[in-house]
Amino acid sequence: MSTQAQTPFAQPLFGRLPIVVRGRNARYIGGVLALAAAYYGAAKAGQALRYTGSVSAVWPPAGLGIGALYLFGLRWWPGVFLGDLVANLELLLGHDPLPLGSLVGQQLGNMAEILIGAALMRRLIGPRAGLDRIDQVTGLFLALAAATAISATIGTFSMLAGGVITTSELTIFWRTWWLGDLSGSLIVVPLLIVWIRDPRAAWRRVCTWEGGLLLLAVSTLPAVAVSSDATVTYVVFPVLIWAATRFRAPGATLAVAIVAGMTIGMTAHHLGPFARQQIDSRTLGTQLYICVAALTTLFLAALVAERERSTAALMEAKRDQGEAAIEERHRIARDLHDSVSQALFSTILQTRTAEKALQNHDVGPSGRLAEALAAIGDLTKGAQSEMRGLIFELRRDPVENGLLAALSEYAEVLFAGTGPEIAVAGPVGRLPLARDSEAELFGIGREALTNIGKHADAANASVRVDVLEDLILLEISDDGHGFDQERREPAHYGLDSMLSRARDIGAALDIFSSPGVGTVIRIEVPLAADLDGGT
């Protein structure tokens, strides 16, 4: 914190530093000098934004020092020390110098703030945080709040001991110092972490036409706010929300820095709602405004990033689960083909052989044994047809080539040349439906075709698919026995399963049947309902 005249803000010096600088080569010395120059420049910028000769709302060097040591290591502390020392020497040699003891205490507090702040951040959020998680933003705030409180405490009592402030000013002075360092840190530290660690990724995030609109809005809305007589500082929050939700941490940190800088600058030039307050209230209002804006934006950006990662992880898990399910289906299909299906085929052969043997031994074809063997053969053949249909379904995505193709192939496999003649009509390829919805339609159609094979004894059947303006129509009909709908057995005909599938995709299912006239099953899927139902 910068301190001048009678309402100072201070920067600390850390006396006995446990950190030893080693390898003082040219590169290291150059880095130390560069950090010292940057720190001194940030201090001059903070002094340039003071409201009067002695009060600044934020103190950027605190954030610069903590961010630099967090990113590059504590061994760079001499750069912070030199920059702070030069800034404090100006106060010592100025027209209204501060006591030497107060300046020494102030620099000690500032160095403690920066070293402890960087160390706490590494402990609480890790050495490579991206501020894209709620716990990281929380840890950042806790580290900065604790470190800046140390600086404010040491600096305030140094000024009190030097006679710069009185006991009655102690509370306000400490609060102003702490919030000034904290608000400066909340602006600068996140900006450094996000933009220095991976500048290309940060730049790619905001370097779009939408990013240009965001920067324009962030730069103009504070000016709009100060041009009004009403207190409308909140108008900038929708833009900060925009930055956090659309541009994540890079956009959020940049937007907060721009808004804070413009707000402080305009208030320092007696513009805006904060400028109309008393100097103490003006400082407090500006500092709280910046802290709240920064924390809100950072937390929102982290929340959006977490949701984004959770969604990506869920989709990845879903893909993995789907691949595992397909592989398991293929395995089951292979097992069924190699075991059950072959066994059923052998059963048919053995049954037919037994029938021929009975006929050769003069057992009449109308005998009970012959009838039973014939029934066994028919039942086994039906089971084999159903098994072939199940294997067909397990081996592949049933609607990979479209609903109509899937139902045609299923009917061909199910009936295997012994069932009714099937007429198929409709569009080729995938329907404008979600994959899950098209798969459910296939499940309904498959159940209807299975019923035709089991119960209808039909000579002809048809499958028709129509894509209308606002719905998809699937109709399956046959000229078989039909059934009495008043006495139908839903579980027997699989009707409950069909109705359940239809409800899952928001479809309407109608069944028209009566004894002797066949059956028509019609399913209508509204396209809007399918879109709402989700993919």
Image: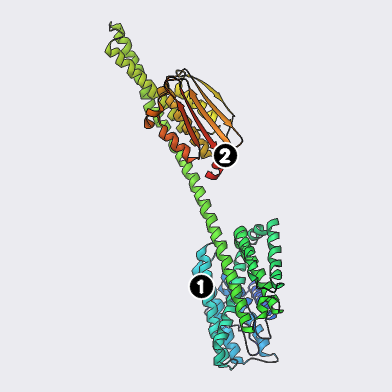
Q: Nearer the viewer, residue 488 or 263?
A: 488
Vertical comparison of 494 with 256: above or below: above
Vertical comparison of 301 with 9: above or below: above
Q: Is residue 535 left or right of residue 32?
A: left
Vertical comparison of 244 with 114: above or below: above
x and y percentages locating residue 55 in the rendered image: 65, 83
Name the residue that disc number 1 marks: 142
Q: Earlier in the sequence, mark 2 or mark 1?
A: 1
Name the residue that disc number 2 marks: 527
- Seen from this angle, which residue lies furthest top? 362
Label 2, secondary structure: give it: helix
At x 59%, y 37%, the residue is 470
Three-letter residue code for mark 2: Leu
Residue 532's image quarter? top right
x and y percentages locating residue 357 in the rendered image: 30, 10
Q: Which quadrant: the N terminus?
A: bottom right
Q: Is residue 163 left or right of residue 450?
A: right
Q: Is residue 364 left or right of residue 71?
A: left
Q: Nearer the viewer, residue 429 or 1?
A: 429
* Residue 474 visible in the picture: yes
Figure disc tally: 2
Q: Is residue 368 left or right of residue 437?
A: left
Label 1: how many residues lie within 10 Å, few (<14), some (14-19) or many (20+)?
Answer: some
Residue 340's image quarter? top left
